[in-house]
Amino acid sequence: MFGRKKSKAWRNLECVYRRFRDTQMRDLFVADNMRGEKYSLHLDNMMVDYSKNRIDDNVMQALFGLARERGVEEKIKAMFSGEKINQTENRAVLHIALRHSGQMPIYVDGRDVMPQIHNVLDKMRDFSEAVRLGTFTGYTGKKLTNIVNIGIGGSDLGPFMAVEALKPYWARDIKCYFISNIDGTACAEVLNKLDPETTLFIVASKTFTTIETLTNAKTCRRWLVDALGEHAVSKHFVALSTNKAEVEKFGINPDNMFEFWDFVGGRYSMWSAIGLIIAIAVGYKNFAKMLEGAEAMDKHFATTDLEHNIPVILALIGIWYNNFYGIHRYAVIPYDQYLQYLPSYLQQLDMESNGKSVTLDNKLVNYATGPVLFGGAGTNVQHSFFQLLHQGTEIVPVDFIVPAISHNEIGNHQPILLSNILAQGEALMHGKTEEEAALELEKAGKSKAEIARLKKYKSFSGNRPSNIIVFKKIDPYALGMLVAMYEHKVFTQGIIWNINSFDQFGVELGKQMALNILPEIEGTAFGVEHDSSTSGLINYIKKLRK
Ligand code: F6P
């Protein structure tokens, strides 16, 4: 596809699809007992098994052909060299520079960005260590043991997910909290637990104009000032932002600001100053390990041929389902309680990046772009939505993620968890025919009539795809690799779809309209024109709130 016309590689994939579409994975496994090994890749202590997908060599070759035709290799180079690939906002995209430890300069507008990145990382190291050691204290001299991140979207989801994922590394005497929602409950429930003397607020906002964050920050500031006075603010508030002027205007001393830059997208920012709460929670050394893991994935992505490139392969398989099988969704299921918020984080990463309908050449797309992503922690979700995954009419490809070793090896919990994840992948792929179901029922002593009645209900179509991603353990390095892998997968898909994965104009309209409605709800504006549904709802809500 691309533009209105189908490209050569796309037409080739359509032919391949027509021949291949009914192929059953269980037959492919029978035909080749090395399939598991053949379609698996390793990087450090990580293994990605993508063999349980509806692919064979022919399919993969055709997909690599598409990637080459779309210039994936060149676009990867362009990103790593600081080109302004975020063309609608005229910005470079350099989250990779945040974890670049080498000596090589990375230029934006002729200026090496590495020194400023390292300065901020040094400042984060010093500050996080001072908070952890208690040498940077609150206004009354008490150690800051309650750290509150106030932010939303990319200024919340990444740090929140990572702090939770790395719980085993937390300093025991420090507690982290996150306030994101504008719902007053979010603020109230956190503040109720805290003592102002021991609380540090981190106001995280790239733009420092986001209404939720600024409103929450103002409420927290008032709470602090009421208790300790205006002078206490500089010891209890820091800001993470690209917008110094707004930070000052808000009343936070620019010395207490940790800077980042326009070349870091919100949803790609947990490696930047936005990661400050991660560094405080788990220590800067562990934060740096997370950067190292991400850098290992960056190197792999930038230097490995497409045929062995993990993010590229995952991206292409996603394209295969999305654009040829017409499957516009996938699930991410971490079998690790500490990774329970990974799906929410990835929802923003993937859906805000690739939920686009206009190409880089300013045309409406005539093909599907970003899929719907959902998920949750296994095994819990086996008992909620897995019924649909196994027997529903919707096909949902799954990414299963699991560590071989748990941080909490209690009894045989981990072997049970591991056997569950592997069984799910196998069951989705293999399914169960009616004959197999009938045989099982017969063995269980069921009558012929019962077998005839039940065998359809008890059968599974199978041929349902999944990737299984195994780590030795979810440590900071592994987490860095995992998140960077998804970042690059999403980027690769954006290249193939010829869209800009780095802007997010789609969230603007609702924000603008909310600003119009606010004065009506507050009773300072009347009679603004809306559709009859919205007007009716405004009036009803106002009546209820009187
Ligand atoms: O939801 C839109 C968005 O702009 C996200 O891209 C961003 O992560 C979030 O709002 C928060 O923005 P900021 O960090 O500027 O407050």
Image (cartoon, rainbow, N blue to C red):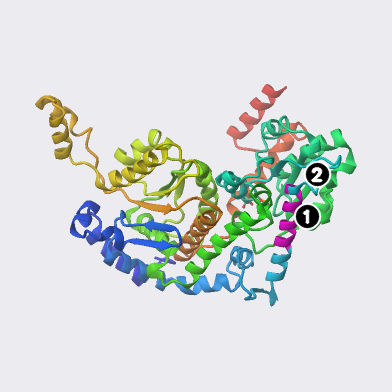
Mark 1 or 2, which is nearer the eye?
2
Badge 2 is on which residue? 236
Percent from the top left, x then y, of residue 246? 79, 53
- Amino acid type, callout 2: His
- Amino acid type, callout 1: Met
Residue span colored magenta: 120-132
Taking depth in this image into account, of 198 and 322 the one nearest to the observer is 198
In the image, taking residue 538 as reference, residue 498 lies left or right, namely left
Residue drawn at x 51%, y 51% is 351
- Specify the quadrant of the image occupied by residue 174: top right
Taking depth in this image into account, of 228 and 20 the one nearest to the observer is 228
- Specify the quadrant of the image occupied by residue 167: top right
The quarter of the rendered structure image containing the C terminus is: top right
Say if residue 125 shows up in the picture: yes
Residue drawn at x 77%, y 46% is 134
Percent from the top left, x then y, of residue 188? 71, 31
Marks 1/2 in contact by CB < 8 Å: the verdict is no
10 Å neighbourhood of mark 1: few (<14), some, or many (≥20)?
many
Task: Of the two numbered discs 1 and 2 on the same chain, state the one appearing first in sequence.
Answer: 2
Q: Is residue 443 magenta?
A: no
The quarter of the rendered structure image containing the N terminus is: bottom left
The local secondary structure at tag 1 comes to: strand
Residue reaching furthest to the bottom: 110
Residue drawn at x 78%, y 55% is 257
**Which of the numbered marks, if any, corresponds to residue 321?**
none
Badge 1 is on which residue? 257
